[in-house]
Image: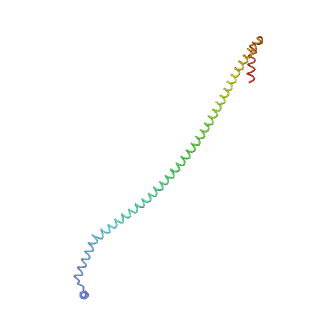
Amino acid sequence: MENELLFQLGINWKLFLSQAINFFILLVVLTFFVYKPLIKVIKERNQKIKTGLDKAEEATARLKEIDNIGKEKIKEAEQKGIEMIKETENRAKILDKENIEKLEKKQKEAQELLKKSILKQQEEAKNKVLTEAGELIKKVIIKTVELKPEAIDEALIKKAVLEVKDEK
């Protein structure tokens, strides 16, 4: 009956059995030689892609870290630059003050030297005038003595010179 049913359906059981065996052989061959290597290649490729993505994420994180470090270094450099400028300005101000103080001191010294020089010149002029006045008095007295010899006296000459000095 089974044979009749299969025969009525047009199925040859020997041919069906050989085709089933061929199918299982083909299935086994394809599984071992195509499917498993293909799955292995796909897993390896997925692993490489995952590794690449992980490395890309690490590189992105490192890049952000380096960028932050760079920004910090730039800020530090700017800060140092500002500090150096301020320090330089302070030094310049101090040097300006010192230079102004030195200049004022030199001006005072020059004024003192000028005063001393003027006083010295005045003293020299006074002494010169006194000397000339003394000589002039001597000449006047000599002329007077020529007219009246009894009036000459050295004490009178000295007294006259001292009086002229005291007046000035």
Q: Position of residue 17 (x, y in %)?
A: 24, 80
In this image, 106 relative to 61: left or right?
right
Quadrant (top left, top right, bottom left, bottom right) of the C terminus: top right
**Residue pushed farthest top?**
150
Please name whichever residue, 149 or 156, is drawn nearer the observer in this view of the structure: 149
Q: Quadrant of residue 136?
A: top right
Please name whichever residue, 157 or 112, is drawn nearer the observer in this view of the structure: 157
- Location of residue 39 with respect to 79 vertically, above or below: below
Quadrant (top left, top right, bottom left, bottom right) of the N terminus: bottom left
Q: Quadrant of residue 151?
A: top right
Q: Position of residue 70 (x, y in %)?
A: 47, 54
Which residue lies at the image location 41% right of the left edge and 61% below the top edge? 56
In this image, 153 relative to 114: left or right?
right
Please name whichever residue, 56 or 78, is drawn nearer the observer in this view of the structure: 78
Color scheme of the displayed model: rainbow
Q: Position of residue 76 (x, y in %)?
A: 51, 51
Which residue lies at the image location 68% right of the left edge and 24% below the top edge? 125
Q: How many marks?
A: 0
Q: Quadrant of residue 29?
A: bottom left
Which residue lies at the image location 28% right of the left edge and 70% below the top edge? 34
- Location of residue 43 with respect to 74 vertically, above or below: below
- Location of residue 56 with respect to 31 vertically, above or below: above
- Location of residue 6 with respect to 98 vertically, above or below: below
**Residue pushed farthest left?**
14
Q: Position of residue 112 (x, y in %)?
A: 65, 31
In this image, 153 relative to 2: left or right?
right
